[in-house]
Image (cartoon, grey):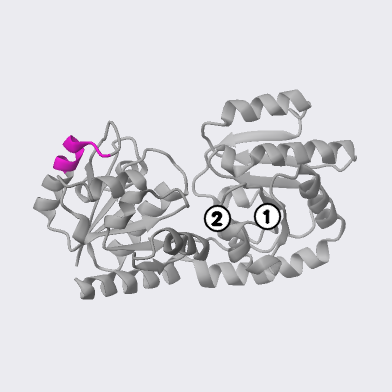
């Protein structure tokens, strides 16, 4: 079966990474696959040149870009087009591209647009995203397929013998709530609780987050090592991983931390709550509350044995559910099912 994998953004977040994972997984499962992406995007950066085509769009729904996509598809002759994100979905269903009957939208968040109604089917990365799709597009055929990634297993973290290192990783975007986490570290300092925070990533909120650290006088307690890939090396340096997101449709970084044996604290929102089994595998806190987050961190550091027990169970769950082998098998089965419907 021939699969065209389309993702036109040039960021380095979860959506972009998963478009690459889809390509790699389907290639490994024996599918004929060609990816199409922005020249500065992760697909063109990471894939061999014979497996990717460049398509830059000046604006969403560009007719010229739609014609270019049509030409690529005419040569490749895909059975299925996987469109990741709004820009890819809008272009694939554009009348001049003429790919709507073959297009399956891969929906990574809640920001999908009305054009999604034109696709043949949709893949939702979490139950919450699937429910949102079904509510807003009741006629759309929606399938759930949780994200997956290569996971590296490390021994579960013992109690830190030095100042505990709190890790956070992701695109530096307002949705990730890193400002809430920084304020929580400020509260811990005021309570004489020693911690060091390391926020790995890059993005539009970088300058604002640095300014907040300066305003709170936390320069000695908060570091920004930049974008780190793969994540397991960063996870190995952390004693505790904190996800402080305001919005998180999935949260694959949690699975990376869990597999690496790092105890987790997370906001109790859609994707993380599902991954962490409603708090069975980690402590959950409300979003937008530096106080609640500081309380949770202080509690965890004061009583490590229950944390270790959760971390062992979390590690087993992550490796079994979100690892590359399991994800490849689920994705392959779903794509084959789509092929049988065409």
- Which quadrant, please, contains the N terminus? bottom left
Examine the rendered structure and indicate whether residue 340 appears above or below residue 191.
below
Q: Residue 251, labelled with which disc?
A: 2
Examine the rendered structure and indicate whether residue 174 appears above or below residue 238.
above
Total label count?
Answer: 2
Q: Residue 55, labelled with which disc?
A: none
Foreground pick, 319 / 266: 266
Residue drawn at x 83%, y 54% as measured from the top left: 301
Specify whether residue 162 is painted magenta: no
Foreground pick, 59 / 339: 59
Q: Position of residue 182 (x, y in %)?
A: 72, 37
Q: Please tell me in which quadrant of the rendered image residue 71 appears.
A: top left
Can residue 7 be seen here? The reply is no
Magenta highlight range: 61-68
How many neighbours does mark 1 have within 10 angstroms: few (below 14), some (14-19), or many (20 or more)?
many
Label 1–label 2 contact, CB within 8 A: yes
Q: Please tell me in which quadrant of the rendered image residue 310 appears.
A: bottom right
- Marks 1 and 2, how far apart in space? 10 Å
Specify whether residue 67 is painted magenta: yes
Residue drawn at x 73%, y 45% as measured from the top left: 165
Q: Position of residue 70 (x, y in %)?
A: 14, 47
**Location of mark 1 (residue):** 266
How many neighbours does mark 2 have within 10 angstroms: few (below 14), some (14-19), or many (20 or more)?
many
Residue drawn at x 55%, y 38% as measured from the top left: 173
């Amino acid at each position: 079966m021939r699969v065209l994998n389309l993702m036109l953004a040039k960021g380095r977040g979860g959506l972009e990474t998963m478009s690459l994972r889809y390509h790699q997984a389907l290639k490994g499962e024996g599918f004929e696959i060609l990816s199409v992406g922005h020249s500065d995007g992760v697909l063109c950066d990471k894939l061999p040149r014979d497996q990717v085509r460049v398509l830059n769009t000046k604006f969403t729904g560009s007719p010229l870009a739609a014609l270019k996509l049509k030409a690529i598809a005419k040569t490749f002759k895909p059975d299925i087009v996987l469109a990741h994100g709004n820009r890819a979905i809008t272009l694939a269903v554009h009348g001049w591209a003429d790919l709507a009957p073959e297009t399956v939208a891969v929906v990574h968040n809640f920001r999908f647009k009305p054009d999604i109604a034109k696709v043949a089917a949709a893949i939702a990365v979490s139950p919450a995203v699937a429910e949102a799709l079904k509510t807003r597009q009741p006629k759309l055929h929606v399938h759930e397929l949780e994200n997956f990634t290569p996971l590296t297993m490390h021994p579960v973290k013992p109690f830190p013998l030095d100042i505990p290192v709190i890790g956070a990783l992701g695109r530096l975007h307002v949705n990730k709530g890193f400002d809430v986490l920084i304020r929580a570290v400020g509260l811990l300092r005021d309570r004489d609780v020693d911690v060091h925070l390391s926020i790995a990533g890059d993005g539009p909120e970088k300058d604002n987050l640095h300014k907040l650290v300066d305003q709170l006088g936390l320069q000695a307690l908060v570091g920004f090592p930049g974008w780190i890939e793969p994540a397991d090396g960063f996870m190995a340096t952390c004693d505790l991983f904190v996800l402080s997101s305001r919005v998180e449709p999935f949260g694959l970084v949690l699975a990376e931390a869990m597999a690496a044996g790092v105890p987790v604290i997370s906001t109790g929102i859609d994707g993380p709550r599902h991954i962490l089994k409603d708090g069975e595998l980690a402590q959950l806190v409300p979003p937008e509350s530096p106080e609640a987050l500081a309380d949770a961190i202080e509690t965890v550091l004061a009583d490590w044995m229950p944390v270790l027990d959760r971390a062992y169970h979390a590690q087993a769950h992550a490796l079994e559910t979100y690892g590359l082998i399991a994800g490849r098998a689920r994705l392959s089965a779903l794509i084959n099912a789509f092929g049988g419907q065409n």
